[in-house]
Image: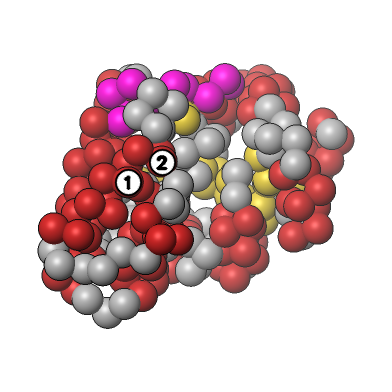
Amino acid sequence: MNAELDRLLAGVGAILLDFDGPVCSIFANHPAPKVAAELANVLRRHGVDVPPDLASEPDPLEVLRRTGATGNQDATRAVEDALCAAERRAVETAEPTPYGREVIVSAQQAGMPVAVVSNNSAGAITAYLAAHRLAGHVSPVVGRAYADPTHMKPNPAPILQAVGAVGEPPSRCVLVGDSLSDIDGAHAAGVRVIGYANRPRKVEAFRAAGADVVITSMGDLAYVLLGAEVDEMR
């Protein structure tokens, strides 16, 4: 595992992190299914007929994605606003991912810019980073495009926006993500990708999807980056 990461990181100049997963569990104490149900109620209040499968959808981002696909811009903006507010509340009690902080700090100290590229809202991400004294270690923060779920990952646009900001070519950037949309988006953007398999069932799925490396703990990445930091100081 460490040898694979060593080889990968030897050709990398910048780290791009997904937020929910590699950095924290945003809905750890504000359950995602409850937020999704709240969004379904927003749709009902706007006169939208909510089919049973959408009413039982546990993923708030999927509720937003499906609302956007209807072409109803008023409903999409209403769901977006409600989701942004829910995410801002959720980050107040989000649980930091073990070793996520160490990855961010050690990467920067090793001379690698660190960006966050997420389907969550930029406001929630920046609030979390500020509360955990990480804001100075991460730039840019590329969050969800307002009320335009077609630009969420796996669309490569937000990844390429982050790549442009860190000043490295795509081939010298690596995205760390915990979903297939991260892997697909990374491939579309031409960046390398580390699959963070925070559930056992994800390991084979990420390998099959073509992740360059699959890790089961952010500690695996932190360990290698700490070694790079030591080398940088010599």
Tell me which residue sits at (81%, 58%) in the image: 208
Which residue corresponds to mark 1?
A: 37
Rendered image: mark on residue 120: none
Q: Is residue 132 above or below residue 187?
A: above
Does the segment drawn in magenta span residue 132?
no
- Say which residue appears at 50% left-offset and 44% top-offset: 18
| Cβ–Cβ under 8 Å for marks 1 and 2 | yes
Tell me which residue sits at (44%, 21%) in the image.
95
Q: Mark number for residue 33?
A: 2
Q: Residue at x 36, y 75 (%)?
A: 69
Q: Could you tell me if residue 142 is visible in this image?
A: no
Q: Position of residue 183 (x, y in %)?
A: 63, 57
Task: Give the crowd class for mark 1: few <14, some 14-19, many >=20 residues within 10 Å.
Answer: some
Q: Main secondary structure of the magenta part?
A: loop
Magenta residues (range): 90-99
Which residue is more in the foreground, 125 or 67? 67
